[in-house]
């Protein structure tokens, strides 16, 4: 949408006030997290320079779900215990969550939204396979970044969107009426501003349709599968009548069904909860 012309000048007030800024250290960390060739030592070097990341990985390594023989006290020990994949996922999730954890008074169910983002990330990574795995997890976590930005910057206005959604209005339509853009389009603009790869921008912008390349298809499918497994998006909730497609039966079985997915999500959400 072009808002540069004089006829549209008065409408810019309705948009989110500004594009969020990602700090340079966190941007470098995200780039590392989607590098499939990164090693444990690379991740440890990032964690050791960021106390919040170290704390998150230590919480995961020392949790009951990790069945520790003895408590660990260093980033390296924690990384070795839970493994490279879990370290990458937890670090990525905490970076995203710490940038957008101010959703009070926005009308969004904070816990359910973060479960949704984690679920889409985890499912997208499995669906995308080796070609896009780490990038798919990050993109899944970020696919609703436009909503996070809108709700974080203008919570009162987004609370009105949430009320309209509760009354039955489609979320994208309610957002467009309030902000002159929807969260998918706004999210794509943020991804562009953060200089993410074109395929990530495309996937974020089309996560409701799946139009585009392999990554966009994986994010869209993961979003639908998350919904079918009972994980809402913080604004609306599954009716219970939806069932995962037979296409995904092996993946659903691997996760332990809807209950298994929720167990995975609780572990990740507790580790990445800002302290």
Image: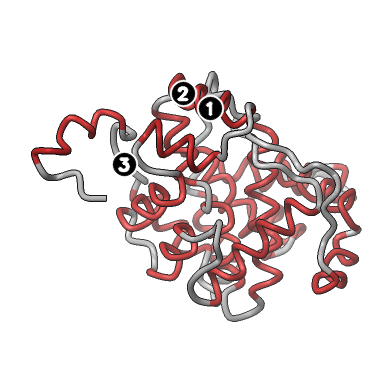
Q: Is residue 241 toward the left or the right of residue 39 in the image?
A: right
Question: In percent of the image, x 74 and y 59: which residue is there?
Answer: 225
Q: CA distance from mark 2 to mark 3?
A: 15 Å
The image shows residue 271 at horizontal and vertical percentages of: 70, 42
Q: Which residue is mark 3?
A: 19
The image shows residue 91 at horizontal and vertical percentages of: 58, 52
Q: Is residue 245 toward the left or the right of residue 146 in the image?
A: right
Frontmost residue, 74 versus 85: 85
Q: Earlier in the sequence, mark 3 or mark 1?
A: 3
Q: Which residue is mark 2?
A: 155
Question: In percent of the image, x 42 and y 50: which residue is there?
Answer: 187
Frontmost residue, 58 versus 73: 58
Q: CA distance from mark 3 to mark 1?
A: 16 Å
Q: Secondary structure at mark 3?
A: loop
The image shows residue 27 at horizontal and vertical percentages of: 39, 54
Q: Residue furthest left?
A: 6
Q: CA distance from mark 1 to mark 2?
A: 7 Å
Residue depth check, mark 2 versus mark 3: number of the one nearer the observer: 2
Q: Residue furthest bottom?
A: 131
Question: In percent of the image, x 73 and y 51: which residue is there?
Answer: 227
User: Neighbour class for label 2 at 10 Å: few (<14), some, many (≥20)?
Assistant: many
Q: Is residue 261 toward the left or the right of residue 237 in the image?
A: right
Q: Is residue 210 above or below residue 130?
A: above
Q: Earlier in the sequence, mark 2 or mark 3?
A: 3
| Total labels drawn | 3
Q: Is residue 202 above or below residue 36?
A: above
Q: Earlier in the sequence, mark 1 or mark 2?
A: 1
- Which numbered tag is attached to residue 186? none
Whether tag 1 and tag 2 are in contact, CB under 8 A, the answer is yes
Q: Which residue is mark 1?
A: 103
């Amino acid at each position: 949408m072009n808002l540069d012309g004089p006829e549209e000048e008065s409408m810019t007030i309705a948009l989110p006030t500004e594009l969020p800024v990602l700090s340079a250290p966190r941007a470098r960390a995200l780039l590392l997290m989607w590098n499939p060739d990164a090693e444990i030592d690379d991740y440890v070097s990032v964690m050791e320079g960021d106390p919040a990341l170290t704390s998150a990985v230590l919480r995961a390594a020392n949790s009951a779900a990790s069945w520790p023989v003895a408590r660990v006290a260093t980033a390296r020990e924690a990384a070795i215990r839970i493994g490279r994949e879990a370290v990458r996922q937890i670090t990525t999730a905490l970076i995203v969550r710490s940038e957008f954890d101010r959703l009070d008074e926005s009308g969004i169910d904070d816990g359910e939204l973060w479960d949704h983002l984690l679920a889409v990330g985890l499912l997208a990574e499995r669906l995308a396979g080796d070609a896009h795995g780490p990038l798919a997890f990050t993109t899944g976590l970020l696919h609703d970044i436009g909503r996070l930005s809108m709700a974080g910057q203008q919570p009162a206005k987004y609370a009105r969107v949430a009320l309209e959604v509760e009354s039955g209005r489609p979320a994208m339509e309610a957002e467009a009426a309030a902000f002159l853009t929807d969260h998918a389009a706004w999210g794509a603009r943020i991804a562009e501003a953060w200089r993410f790869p074109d395929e990530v921008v495309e996937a974020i912008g089309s996560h409701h349709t799946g139009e585009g390349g392999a990554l966009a298809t994986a994010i869209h499918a993961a979003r639908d599968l998350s919904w079918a497994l009972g994980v809402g998006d913080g604004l609306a909730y599954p009716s219970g009548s939806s069932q995962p497609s037979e296409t995904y039966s092996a993946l659903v079985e691997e996760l332990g069904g809807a209950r298994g997915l929720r167990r995975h999500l609780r572990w990740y959400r507790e580790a990445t909860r800002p302290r």
